[in-house]
Image (tube, rainbow, N blue to C red):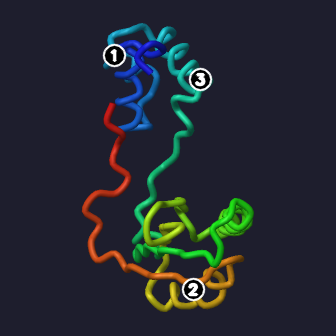
Amino acid sequence: MAARLDRTDLKILRLLQNNGRLSNAELAETVAISPATCHRRTQRLFEDGFIATVRAMIAPKKVAKGTLVMVGVVLDRSTPESFAIFEQAVAKLKFVLDCHLVAGDFDYFLKIRVGDMEDFNRIHGEQLIALPGVRQTRTFFVMKEVVDNAPLEF
């Protein structure tokens, strides 16, 4: 990373990570470069894949998705084929925010946002346990979000 990014690039990345709504002029002023140079650098950061996307962080409670649920999933087989089939199916579920293949007691951890426990109970019974290869799920209802989507440290 250090060979491809200089201090100015890193500063641009940190600023945009903390506030993706900064205008090019604001960003250029904060970084102490011209707006044209800032625009070229920002475009290069997108093109080179350092910035994957820019999007708004929606307040979950404001859109009736205030309940955060983590689900550990165990598949009936641990083969590349069963993993691939599960991953293709879970990627289609709009209520799944994150899906991670993990080492340990579970094969996958899912991060899910729902309206309430009743909402989760419905999708669990209708969709989660019906995913291909699922042998077992263990559900963890989040009581308090201490750190969520923190900026990357670099």
CA neighbours of label 2 inside 10 A, class few (<14), some (14 to 19), many (20+): some
Q: Which residue is mark 2?
A: 124
The tally of labels here is: 3
The CA span between labels 3 and 2 is 39 Å
Q: Are marks 2 and 1 in contact (CB under 8 Å)?
A: no
The CA span between labels 2 and 1 is 48 Å
CA neighbours of label 1 inside 10 A, class few (<14), some (14 to 19), many (20+): some
Q: Which residue is mark 3?
A: 48
Q: Which residue is mark 1?
A: 31
User: Is label 3 in a helix, a strand or a loop?
Assistant: loop
The image shows residue 76 at horizontal and vertical percentages of: 63, 78
Nearest the eye: 117 or 88: 88
The image shows residue 100 at horizontal and vertical percentages of: 52, 59
Asked if residue 122 lies left or right of residue 67, the reply is right
The structure residue drawn at horizontal position 45% and vertical position 58%, both measured from the top left corner, is 58
Q: Which numbered disc flags the more N-terminal residue, 1 or 3?
A: 1
Name the amino acid type tagged 1.
Val
Asked if residue 123 lies left or right of residue 149, the reply is right
The CA span between labels 1 and 3 is 20 Å
Name the amino acid type tagged 3.
Asp
Name the amino acid type tagged 2.
His
The image shows residue 3 at horizontal and vertical percentages of: 45, 13
Which quadrant: the C terminus?
A: top left
The structure residue drawn at horizontal position 62% and vertical position 84%, both measured from the top left corner, is 129
Residue 88, relative to residue 122: is it above or below? above
Asked if residue 62 lies left or right of residue 90, the reply is left
Nearest the eye: 50 or 23: 50
Residue 58, relative to residue 89: is it above or below? above
The structure residue drawn at horizontal position 41% and vertical position 32%, both measured from the top left corner, is 16
The structure residue drawn at horizontal position 40% and vertical position 71%, both measured from the top left corner, is 61
